[in-house]
Structure formats: structure tokens, C-alpha cells
Amino acid sequence: MKCPRCVQQIHRAAASCPQCGFSIADADQLFGNEEIKLRTLTDAAGIFRRHERIFLEEAMDKIAHRFPQIFVAIYTGSLGESGHLRQFGFWLLNRGVFEDVPMEKPNENGILIVIDPDSKSAGMTHGYLLDPYLEEKDSFDCLSRAHSYWLEGRYADGAVRSLRALEDLLIKRCRQACRDTEKYERRYGKVSAMKDEVKKLRKHDSKQATKHRQSEKEVNL
């Protein structure tokens, strides 16, 4: 994975970036340290009409049906003065509680697309357990399918194009992994080992959030 701040490659088990020191605590300072309840399609910016939301949900459900172990989410909203799209996506995928996603699908298995219509920018973030299958270039390729549509304000059409590109990409990656399982395990380790690392990360993040809330209470007192 890459650091959301300096975009340098870091190990997925790292508690913070060894290059710039960025961690979930820094994202919490920008966006808050409380869990956020939302749905996989959250249109905070109000850019989708009702029939467009249905259209998008169908495209998202199609991916979830083909790949039942993962989920896809779309969030639209203005980031205001912060403007840190990559950091916001990282934070939301860590702190978001997606109410329409089954408990057996952790956020580490999620793919999040964030669209900021005010700054005319978008980003794609994926969970740690998808590192073996998705790379930085993949996110760019999927989002580039929507670029011309978003410039014209056709946000739903663009998002659907991105989702279709993502589905095709996941199909391709799964076939590659099936043909050469050892290659993926050599590069990223077994999935069971990755899950253990994720558990450690969750435990660390939970401790950090608790410390942050405690320090806030002390300041308020």
C-alpha cells in the first residue's frame, strides 16, 4: 500500500509511514475520530437523482454478487478547505460503518470511491486485504473511464463506467491469481497471514483512538 500523504510505498502492517510519519491519528485530527455511519451509496453532495442512484446500486450489487467477499462504496461530498482526497478516503474506509454491508465483510475488503464535485476530483481507496489484487495504476485506470463524463457533470454515468472497469479488472486479477497462486503468495503472503496483520492494525488503531479521546476529555476538563 501507499501512504495517503506522501504516496511512498509502505508495509501494510506499519502503524505509521516511515517516510513522513502519517498515521490514522493524523487523519482523525483532520476529519474526526468517531465512527461514521453511512451506506455504501452516500450522496452527501446531492449530485445523483433517484433513478441514477438505483442505476448505481445495481452496478455495485453486480460486483458484490460476483465477488461476495468484497463490497464497493461510493461517497460524494465537498471536502472544503482540507482538500485531502486521498487522506479522506483512507480515513473514511477506516472509520466508516457501512450499515448495508454484512458483518462478515470487513472494511479491509472494501473499495471506496470518493467524488468531490466542488473541486472536480475523485479518488479510489481499497482495504488492506485487496493489496494483492489492486495497484495504484488500477485505481487511476478505473477513474479515468469516468473523467470525460464527470467534466460534463454526468456523475452517475461516469461512476458506472468506473464500476464496470473495476469489475473487469477484478475478474482479470482473479484469473491471474488462480493460474499462479504461488506468485501472489510470494509477493504478498497468504491471506490468513494478512488477516492476522489486519487484526493487529485494528487493535493498534483502537488503542490510538481511545488515547485521543481521553486526551480530549482531559483538555475539556
Image (cartoon, rainbow, N blue to C red):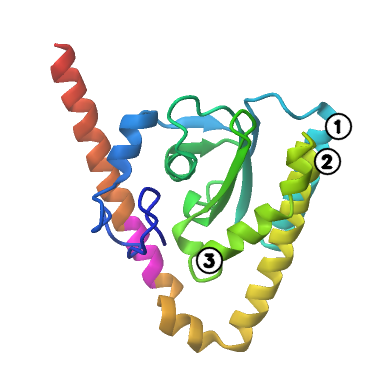
**For the residues carrying marks 1 and 3, which lies nearer the camera in this image?**
3
Residue at 18% in and 13% down: 220
Tell me residue 50's x, y (percent). 82, 27
Asked if the stretch drawn in magenta spans residue 196, the answer is yes
Q: For numbered disc 2, what is the local secondary structure? A: helix
Relative horizontal placement of residue 82, taking residue 23 as reference (left or right): right
Using the rendered view, name the quadrant where residue 173 is placed: bottom right
- Residue ID for mark 3: 135
Pick the residue in front: 102 or 10: 10
Work out whether 78 lies above or below 101: above
Work out whether 131 lies above or below 150: below
Q: For numbered disc 3, what is the local secondary structure? A: loop
Span highlighted in magenta in the image: 193-199
Query: In the rendered structure, are the residues bearing label 1 and label 2 in contact, judged by CB atoms less than 8 Å apart?
Result: yes
Q: CA distance from mark 1 to mark 3?
A: 32 Å
Tell me if mark 3 has few (under 14), some (14-19) or many (20+) residues whose alpha carbon lies within 10 angstroms of its own. few
The type of residue carrying mark 3 is: Glu
For the stretch drawn in magenta, the main secondary structure is helix
Query: In the rendered structure, are the residues bearing label 2 and label 3 in contact, judged by CB atoms less than 8 Å apart?
Result: no
The type of residue carrying mark 2 is: Phe
| Disc number placed over residue 55 in the picture, else none | 2
| Disc number placed over residue 51 in the picture, else none | 1
Tell me if mark 2 has few (under 14), some (14-19) or many (20+) residues whose alpha carbon lies within 10 angstroms of its own. some
Tell me residue 69's x, y (percent). 60, 60
Pick the residue in front: 167 or 157: 157
Work out whether 69 lies above or below 120: below
Residue at 42% in and 62% down: 1
Relative horizontal placement of residue 122, taking residue 90 as reference (left or right): right
Q: Determine if residue 121 is in view.
A: yes
Residue at 23% in and 50% down: 21
Q: Determine if residue 69 is in view.
A: no
